[in-house]
Image (tube, grey):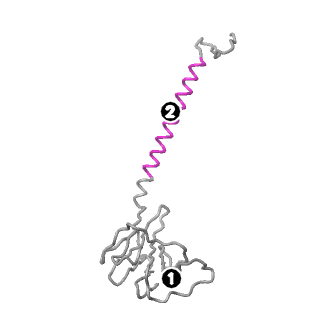
Amino acid sequence: MTNIPGHQQSIKRRDDTRIGRQHAGLGQQTKITTHALIATATAAATIGLAATAHADEIYDFLSPSGNIVCFVSTSFDGTNGAECEIRDYTYVAPPKPPGCQLGGWGDRFSLKQGSAPVVHCHGDTNFVPGLPILPYGQTRSAGPITCNSEASGVTCTDRSTGHFFRLSRESYQLG
């Protein structure tokens, strides 16, 4: 076998068939096939995720007065919850905890499945333009968490535990 500079060397097998370039082509074909299999597996996994993503629900809404904004959601990790924020209120907010240095306190409440409702310390707002209005008498649910829009305010309840929060201009209630 002669080694010529600049040329690919072929290796002669016992049965006199030549391998070398054929393997380079086969290697490329194998690489393409492998990439195609990876792409197919990725697409299948994505389709599988899309099917489970159906359970991933998020409902953002404003009360008809525009004074309360809420979102109710089920996330990929299976966490169900609701969070509502009120813009204008006349109730007395609960005492501000010492660690809350941010501007917002007593106007944002949340409920996660299996837990008691909480009041949040925050420095932002959930009010953004263009959110849909949830008419009075309507509900939005994610798993066992349901929020009801009523003329008297919004109530979000965890049907699995009975925990809830109720929010209106005049009052709030945690249970």
Q: Secondary structure at mark 1?
A: strand
Q: How far is mark 1 from mark 2, CA to CA?
A: 59 Å
Residue 174 x, y percent position in the rendering? 46, 84
Which region is colored magenta?
Answer: 19-48
- Residue situated furthest bottom in the rendering: 92
Q: Secondary structure at mark 2?
A: helix
Mark 1 touching mark 2, by CB under 8 A?
no
Residue 63 found in image quarter:
bottom left
Observer-nearest of 113 and 68? 68
Q: Name the residue located 34 percent from the left edge and 71 percent from the top edge.
A: 133
Please tell me whether the stretch drawn in magenta is mainly helix, strand or loop: helix
Tell me the residue that label 1 is attached to: 106
For the residue carrying disc 1, how many other residues have a C-alpha within 10 Å: few (<14), some (14-19), or many (20+)?
A: many
In this rendering, is residue 80 above or below 161?
Answer: above
Tell me the residue that label 2 is attached to: 33
Q: Identify residue type, mark 1.
A: Gly
Residue 6 found in image quarter:
top right
Residue 36 x, y percent position in the rendering? 48, 36
Q: Name the residue located 51 percent from the left edge and 40 percent from the top edge.
A: 38
| Quarter in which the N terminus is drawn | top right
In this rendering, is residue 1 above or below 86?
Answer: above
> Mark 1 or mark 2: which comes first in sequence?
2
The mark lying in front, picked from 1 and 2, is 1
